[in-house]
């Protein structure tokens, strides 16, 4: 199987996993065949991508967080935002329940690096950005040795880190281009707005509420709203800062394409020690699948291979299956290479979507 953006879907493709709406309803079941009507409806609903079966369908992509849990948490957050807009109340009990569901799934799969595609589904940026930041923060906290209670506070605070954005004009948030200095000044008010909203809830710890206040602070004092230095920023704020920045980097925005997974990690490491706490960056990066299962790689031998397995212990050393030789011909008997055991062969780069599609089309023709 593989994950495709909506714009890459074609009639006749078979769905590899159930497709759910943001409120948890099944839109299309596994093994459904796509047609033009289905694709059009999925696009108009804002679906960003989905899993399809292909000619490498024996490769299963692990689901770190179930689609049901992701949609439940997203729906809870959406309802809370809508309720706050109308009656100024956030259902904190539901927030805690949702985060505990996330923690259960994450702890059940704690040895598997997270594939970005696992949690990035719909195009509703602010909503799903908040859920992604919560997931990334929880996984980072788990790597730093936090227990379930601490992870819950971290997760709820991270889920609500951008609640202050509800006070910002949507025309600024959705502007298809870089913001002006005046618009940036308006947006930079959201951490303090969010903190003032959250600190009124007794159910939420002050530490968790401070995530909203401090997630744009930087350890060198260059952040906002207070230009705090390293020791002045709580650890939850440091974790959320890394999670928030990474998710923003790898997200497609109206004015730019998102970074690749590996490029996002490179940026974090370059900013480690200046913008971000080095310990937090390394804990965060240890959870990211640098080479996600199912992608195609060019090796230093000239061969092309598909990633079949990854581990948290060695995220840069996946197990791959070689499918094309150095001359671009199909291997009669594809074989696997474990980079943890083979030091002579190295990865040059990930193939582009266009290169990948061309190879998969050749495989399809070969099998037909």
Image (spheres, rainbow, N blue to C red):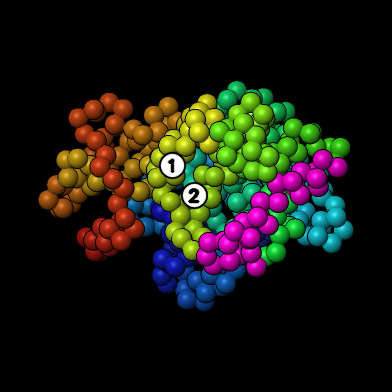
Residue at the limit of the structure toward the left, as seen here: 327
Q: Vertically, is 26 above or below 313?
A: below
Residue 187 is inside the magenta segment: yes
The reply to whether residue 63 is visible in this rendering is: no
Q: Residues within 10 Å of mark 2 (few under 14, many from 20)?
A: many
Please identify the dominant SS of the magenta region. helix
The reply to whether residue 219 is visible in this rendering is: yes
Q: Vertically, is 145 above or below 101?
A: above
Residue found at x 39% / y 43%: 262
Taking the image as shown, residue 287 lies to the left or right of residue 77, namely left
Q: Secondary structure at mark 2?
A: helix
Q: Which residues are magenta?
A: 171-200
Taking the image as shown, residue 135 lies to the left or right of residue 278, namely right
Q: Which residue is mark 1?
A: 267
- The spot of residue 209 in percent (x, y) is 75, 39
Taking the image as shown, residue 248 lies to the left or right of residue 214, namely left
Residue 249 disc label: 2
Q: Are marks 2 and 1 in contact (CB under 8 Å)?
A: yes
Residue found at x 43% / y 51%: 259
Distance in Å between CA atoms under marks 2 and 1: 9 Å
Residue 27 is inside the magenta segment: no
């Amino acid at each position: 199987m593989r994950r495709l953006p909506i714009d890459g879907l074609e009639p006749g493709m078979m769905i590899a996993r159930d497709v759910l709406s943001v409120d948890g309803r099944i839109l299309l079941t596994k093994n459904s065949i796509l047609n033009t009507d289905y694709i059009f409806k999925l696009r108009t609903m804002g679906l960003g991508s989905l899993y399809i079966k292909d000619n490498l369908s024996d490769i299963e992509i692990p689901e770190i967080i179930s689609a049901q849990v992701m949609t439940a948490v997203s729906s809870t957050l959406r309802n809370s935002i809508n309720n706050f807009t109308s009656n100024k109340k956030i259902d904190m009990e539901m927030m805690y329940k949702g985060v505990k569901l996330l923690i259960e799934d994450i702890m059940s799969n704690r040895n598997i690096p997270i594939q970005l595609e696992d949690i990035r589904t719909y195009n509703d940026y602010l909503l799903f950005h908040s859920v992604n930041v919560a997931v990334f923060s929880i996984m980072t906290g788990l790597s730093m040795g936090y227990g379930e209670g601490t992870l819950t506070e971290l997760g709820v605070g991270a889920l609500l880190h951008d609640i202050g954005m509800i006070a910002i004009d949507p025309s600024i948030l959705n502007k298809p281009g870089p913001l002006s200095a005046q618009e940036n000044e308006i947006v930079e008010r959201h951490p303090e707005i969010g903190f003032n909203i959250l600190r009124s809830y007794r159910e939420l710890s002050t530490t968790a509420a401070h995530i909203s206040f401090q997630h744009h602070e930087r350890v060198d004092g260059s952040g906002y709203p207070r230009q705090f230095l390293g020791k002045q920023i709580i650890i939850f704020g440091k974790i959320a800062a890394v999670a928030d920045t990474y998710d923003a980097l790898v997200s497609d925005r109206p004015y730019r394409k998102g970074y690749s997974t590996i490029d996002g990690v490179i940026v974090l490491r370059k900013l480690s020690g200046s913008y971000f706490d080095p310990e937090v960056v390394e804990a965060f990066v240890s959870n990211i699948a640098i080479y996600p299962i199912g992608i195609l790689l060019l090796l230093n031998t000239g061969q092309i291979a598909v990633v079949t397995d990854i581990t948290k212990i060695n995220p840069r050393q996946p197990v791959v299956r070689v499918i094309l030789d150095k001359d671009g011909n199909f291997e009669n008997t594809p074989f696997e290479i474990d980079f943890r055991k083979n030091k002579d062969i190295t990865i040059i780069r990930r193939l582009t979507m266009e290169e990948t599609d061309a190879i998969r089309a050749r495989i399809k023709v070969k099998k037909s």
